[in-house]
Image (tube, grey):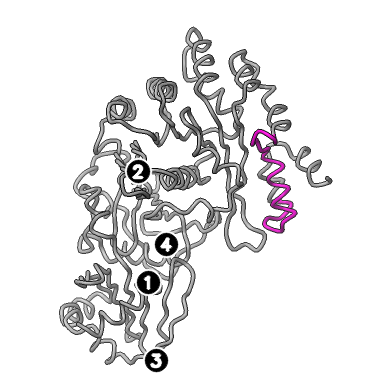
Amino acid sequence: MRALDSLLGILVQQGGDELRLVAKQRPRMFAGASELSLTMPVMSADGIRHLLDDLWRASAGELARGGQVTRAYRSAELGTFAVHLTQRDGGPLEVAFRRAIDEGAAAMDNEAEAVIGAVPPALYAVLSRAQARGASDVHLGPGAPPVMRVNGALALLDDVPPCDPAVLLGERGEGEVSVDRALEVPGIGRLRVNVYRSAEGLCAAIRLLRREAPDLAALNLPPQLAALTELPHGLVIACGPTGCGKSTTLAALLEHALRARARVLVTLEDPIEYRIRPQRPAGLVRQREVGTHVRDFASGLRDALREDPDLLLIGEMRDPETISLALTAAETGHLVFASLHSRTAPSAIERVVDTYPPERQRQVRVQLAEALRAVVAQRLVATADGGGVVPAVEILRVTHGVANLIREHRTAQLVSALQAGGAEGMLVLERHLADLVRGGRIARDAALTAANDPATLQEYLRQ
């Protein structure tokens, strides 16, 4: 189908990921939620059917019965595309072409459910609409309209029918209370899914993940963060509440580190969220998923220490054994990045120590003082124009003085060290929030809500 390949070639050349054709309407092309320029005449329904050729002949009957069909189209030169056809109740014929995952990425996780035919049309319609609107999460409930989260706010997906969460269970989990899955959907990308039972019935929470790790510069993070990738060894912890962008920041930092020189990166994740690629010809990336490639974080980390890594990523430090192994790796010449659920940098240190029984906490403080290099606490704040979110960050660098405070159980004094440590690359959350307010990026009220200490923020704003 040369005509279709020529059209899809424009999508690829322009860096887009979706092309939408609607009979008697202007064709539109998108990269994520942004519309790209496309000069192309309006097409009739017959013109679209002629363009689809064999795809149309294979789909017409099913489309007439159900109103929507999803197919895969493989171009020898351009790769695979997901094709979503819709025509209901005499309405216009609509076709959406989405670029699917590349075969190399699919080979990374052969356990991923990566065939478009396995995705029910109702689910694909929900995911497609949510992605087009820039949603980060989708919630499904029994017989209820899907709900999506966009820039932190919830909104109904009221232009698609309800989707039964049971379609996400696959062949496993029918009798389980809760099931976690990582899925790969061509044309949509990677999903992190939790299907669970509640008083309302079977429900699901779906996180839409970007396939590729973003560029560090594109995240609008403070410039002090890039220096963390130059550390020769040690532990760097990213902390913050769920959904604050920890995984995104860590993935961007790792790609930045891989770009600087060839290294071996081994990751342990639950699930794998971003496809991290070597940035140098001799570099290597080995991404491993807990429950699929390794039994748990601790056993995977023990294996990783025998796999000649320069960089290690631990998706979450959950238990004493994993934390001990991470500290050992950091002490023995590896640069380790890990995430932790904690609101502030000082509280992250206490969270690690409190994981252990009292008789071991002194030893852990000594290890932390020796191995820890930085703690990055992050949260996302809505932009002033309501069009997105921006990260607000706190950075604690472990200087000689900070190490002494950790070792001597004087973490309450870390806030003062943060405030005085600007020359060492430290950053207080309230100072970063004040800078974002003064730059017009976020509103004052949003900054006050995000601050750990609103009074300190007010002081910075008055300076």
Residue furthest right in the image: 462
Q: Looking at this view, is 159 or 189 the one in front? A: 189
Percent coordinates x, y for residue 305 in the rendering: 32, 26
- Label 4 crowd (10 A; few <14 / some 14-19 / many >=20): some
Which residue is at a point 32% across and 40% down the rendered structure image? 178
Percent coordinates x, y for residue 177 in the rendering: 31, 38
Q: Which mark identifies residue 41?
A: 3
Q: Mark 2 points at which residue?
A: 197
Q: Can residue 189 be seen in this view?
A: yes
Q: Mark 4 points at which residue?
A: 145
Q: In this view, does 450 lie to the left or right of 54?
A: right
Q: In this view, does 304 lie above or below 383?
A: above
The residue type indicated by label 2 comes to Arg
Badge 4 element = loop
The residue type indicated by label 1 comes to Glu
Q: Mark 1 points at which residue?
A: 18
